[in-house]
Amino acid sequence: MNISLFTGQGSQTPGMGKDIAESFPSASKIYDIASEILERDMRAICFESSAEELSRTINAQPAIMINSLASVTAAMEKGFAFQGVAGHSLGEYAALAISGTVSPEDAFRLIKARAEAMEEAARQSKGAMAAVMKLAPEKIEEICSQAENYVTAVNYNSPQQTVIAGTPEGIEEVTAKFAELKARVVPLAVAGAFHSKLMQSAADKFYEAAKTINFKSPEVKYYSNVTGGELTDFSDMPSLLAKHIVSPVRFTSELAAMQADGAELFVEFGPGKALTGLVKKTLKGVTAVNIDSLAALEGAEIYG
């Protein structure tokens, strides 16, 4: 089984995807759809923005999704086929679109509402995130639960990498304890404490927007951050996607579930290769590649 993976916020880079958009009309069309729905020139934002401007949640989320969808669309045109999809955080929305669960137009309506709600929540409740390396998730959970200030584990990325989120004071408090255990802590360049209770106002606001969207059952297997496995019940997606904003990303569990279902090839679409690295660190006996440029697209052995 082949899996299409879609990356999350923080992977954006100025100019990303320009070569693919210029080489594939089908990929370029994604920018037109997004620009119309978002009422902004998304080509200019993706290709001409500074790193600082592109990193704003309201820009980063749609820009990354455009890049991811454009890359997978181009790969499909070249003959790539897949039987399952998964995304990391924001990447779940590209997975929704390419799996047929929502139309491309509705996917951008969802991401517009999500990005705006999360940017507003980040302004209201100051938060931070950091990646903790080389420490068991269970130990990270234990230390976070004992902190005086709010901090919690939110992204279970690999057996050796867990992301925490919380107040700046909470992050600072546990960072000192992790240092005592020789764990490496890397602050993340994000605007808020995503996937934590500090995003509850965003989840509530987003839910109202999601209720206006028409959801269908996917055409391929769809794996969920919230459940950590294949999602089979699509009867109340607005509630699930709202919960997703304040719930941990159980990516390690998802990878295990996909491998158990027969997944052997994982192809990451979108800027960077963060998920490709996580697959290689977590699973044995599988192939993982990333498609983030025309050269990678042309050279990938994923077709036929």
Image (cartoon, rainbow, N blue to C red):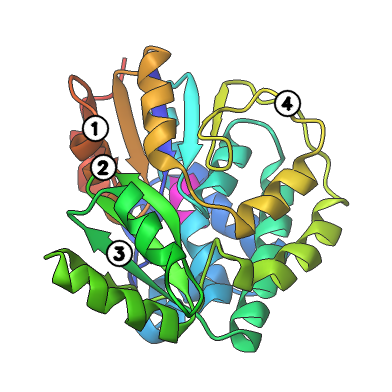
Q: How crowded is mark 1: few (under 14 residues within 10 Å), some or many (20 or more)?
A: many
Please say if 288 is above or below 260.
below
Q: Which of 82 and 244 is in front in this view?
A: 244
Marks 3 and 2 sit apart, C-alpha to C-alpha, by 12 Å
Instruction: Kindly report the secondary structure that dominates the magenta region of the rendered protein.
Output: helix
Mark found first going from the N terminus, 4 or 3: 3
Mark found first going from the N terminus, 1 or 2: 2
Mark found first going from the N terminus, 3 or 2: 3
Mark found first going from the N terminus, 4 or 2: 2
State the residue at coordinates (71%, 56%): 110
**Region in magenta:** 66-70
**Residue 33 in the image: x percent, y percent?**
65, 55
Image disc number at residue 288: 1
Q: Residues within 10 Å of mark 2 (few under 14, many from 20)?
A: some
**Foreground label between 1 and 2:** 2
Q: What residue type is labelled 4?
A: Asp
Quadrant in the rendering for residue 220: top right
The answer to whether the residue labelled 4 contacts the one labelled 3, judged by CB atoms less than 8 Å apart, is no
Q: What residue type is labelled 1?
A: Ala
Residue identified by numbered label 2: 159
Name the residue furthest left: 182
Q: How crowded is mark 3: few (under 14 residues within 10 Å), some or many (20 or more)?
A: many
The answer to whether the residue labelled 1 contacts the one labelled 3, judged by CB atoms less than 8 Å apart, is no
Label 1 sits on a secondary structure element that is: strand
